[in-house]
Image: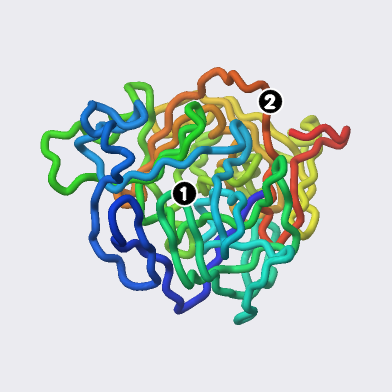
Amino acid sequence: MHPSPIACPGRNVPSFLCSGAGRIRWSVRSLVACFFVWAWHGAALGEDMIDGVLPARCVAHVMTVPLMSHSGSPVVPVEVNGTSGLAYVSFTQEEVGVFLGGMDYPKGQVYPIQTIGGRSYSFSTVVRSFHLAQGVAENVPACVVGDTIEKIGDRPVLAIVGYSILSNYDVLLDFVGKKMILFRLSETAQDCRAMSQWLGPDAVSLPLQANERGVRTGIEVTAGNVPLHMEVEPGSNASVVRQKDARAAGITHAVLRDDPRVRTVVGRVLLGHRHHFDNVTIGEWKGQSLDVNVEKAQYNLLGMDFLRNRKVLMAFPQGMLYVTRAQASTDGDLRVRSALSTHLATATVQETSGVSR
């Protein structure tokens, strides 16, 4: 259901280098400042906007990738070691994650990891080649996140695109337009509107906060006048609040007794309750509603039940998050349950009646 922060201490992460027109080559070396706009975006650059969202003259180094799962946990097309398939998109997965299945990956160092359900173990590996849109990475450090390769439709889910790649970019997850756009701000453009205005006047702006590992993937959400650090995680189908944080916000055991019971399988089973908040503050938005799983979790997550049907701009280089209000979905309920429990049991949130949430 949701990935956990994973890192292999002392190892480098993929960075991005130029490699000819219309394609970028990523390499496990220090980042080289290399900005150019793809030839396939040439027509858009003569106009005011790219994909109807980004001011063309203010951005560079643009890649657009379709979100294949529509309103569900986002997946994007990738190619891993020559095999075509899909990858989940995760902000809190610190490295590229891979699923074993029949894939042949070298086994590296075994190390402990922290998942939302507690401590576990995984091992490091190396991906020979990783293709995403016009980008290709070679000899990419990765972590094994599961034994089983699931399928969405007839396409295998091979990997997780994590922080080590995404943090090099401003990342727009457009759940309305069903696309992910990776870009950087232009170093030469002048008189550009502030990025906080790009998503429209109703978008909220929030500074990214560092988690316990010092990685800025979270925001502050206030529930019942209590500030909560919540990791922004599109790979989770539900938002999660730790029991101790819920108690601090006034959600006692007596209150939870009236809430639906839920169970989440993340290698182990987390039992809890689904609680509805009506007094949540997110940036300048006050009095917001938010449904969360109150469980004995290790940290809090802001998941797809909140992010769905919005435009979410994770501006990693600027340390900011910009989010629009939710729009009415035209897809019906096409939620794809996420396999991102990390190391791994596929998890959906279920009430005791067995109805997936």
Residue annotated with mark 1: 218
Foreground of the two, 189 or 281: 189
Vertical position of residue 174 compared to residue 25: above or below:
above
Foreground of the two, 189 or 239: 189
Who comes first in sequence, dot 2 or dot 1?
Answer: 1
Outermost residue, bottom side:
109
Foreground of the two, 21 or 342: 21
Mark 2–mark 1 contact, CB under 8 Å? no
Expressed as whole percent of the image width and height from the top left, the position of residue 263 reads 80, 45
User: Quarter of the image containing the C terminus?
Assistant: top right
Q: CA distance from mark 2 to mark 1?
A: 27 Å
Left/right placement of residue 226 relative to residue 104 reads left
Amino acid type of the residue tagged 2 in the rendering: Asp
Residue 136 bears which disc, if any?
none
Residue at 41% x, 41% y: name it: 64
Which marked residue is nearer to the observer: mark 2 or mark 1? 2
Residue 344 occupies quadrant: bottom right
Amino acid type of the residue tagged 1 in the rendering: Gly
Left/right placement of residue 163 relative to residue 118 reads left
Residue annotated with mark 2: 333
Expressed as whole percent of the image width and height from the top left, the position of residue 258 reads 79, 30
Residue at 65% x, 40% y: name it: 237
Q: Residues within 10 Å of mark 1 (few under 14, many from 20)?
A: many
